[in-house]
Amino acid sequence: EIVMTQSPATLSVSPGERATLSCRASQSVTSNLAWYQQKPGQAPRLLIYGASIRATGIPVRFSGTGSGTEFTLTISSLQSEDFAVYHCQQYHNWPPITFGQGTRLEIK
Amino acid sequence: EVQLLESGGGLVQPGGSLRLSCAASGFRFSNYAMTWVRQAPGKGLEWVSVIRDSDGGTYYADSVKGRFTISRDNSQNTLYLQMSSLRAEDTAVYYCAKVLVVVAAALDHWGQGTLVTVSS
């Protein structure tokens, strides 16, 4: 099973600044990676798939990069509604699907 | 508009059974793989099971294999998860989610979740 590791566990950033979240796979997943945003009491929302493709309706300030084992989600200018937990997920040769443990993005 | 609505959660004793349902609307249900994902309180997301659209093939996480059964009724646009031999560690919010496409198994729509609590 491919293990996904996200860092940092918690990231503190001021509104208007850039946030950079990382996700590492235990083996190559090529570009078979997705990112999700989850707010308290809500279901996850798909942000990015194929490592860099924004899902429908996702603002351009969200961008994904990477391939193989190293991936990054960047939020270019943080808005108040962006403070949430972010999960990465791999679907290379699925099933199984595996998720990272999440990064909590909090207001500095 | 795609909508997924889970139901069937609740409190169950260890060793008991429960069946979750997920009513789908707003898309051609029979054309998409569907999955269950769970989230224990304060924890991350854990994939549970998937059922394919094409042949109805099913797959399970090792943690639930032999105890959970996923199924679908395409005539009723409904996804199910039959859970048996439940354990305390199965306590979680269970989400159903639609798979984007088979070649890119991102989950593009999620239900609101239903809470399953396993406790005596």
Image (tube, rainbow, N blue to C red):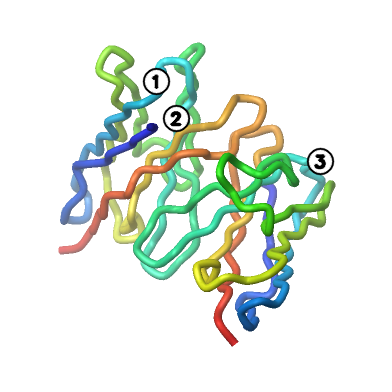
Residue in the image at 29% along x and 25% along y: B78
Chain bearing tag 1 is B
- Could you tell me residue A105's position as x and y percent? 58, 74
Q: Which residue is mark 3?
A: A30
Q: Are marks 3 and 2 on the same chain?
A: no
> Dot 3: what SS?
loop
Please say if the residues under marks 3 and 1 sit with CB atoms less than 8 Å apart.
no
What amino acid is found at the position of numbered circle 2 in the picture?
Answer: Met
Numbered badge on residue B13: none
Horizontally, residue A68 falls left or right of residue A91, namely: right
Residue in the image at 56% along x and 53% along y: A36
Q: Which residue is mark 2?
A: B34
Residue in the image at 21% along x and 48% along y: B9
What amino acid is found at the position of numbered circle 1 in the picture?
Answer: Phe
Does residue B31 lie above or below A42 as drawn? Answer: above
Please say if the residues under marks 1 and 2 sit with CB atoms less than 8 Å apart.
yes
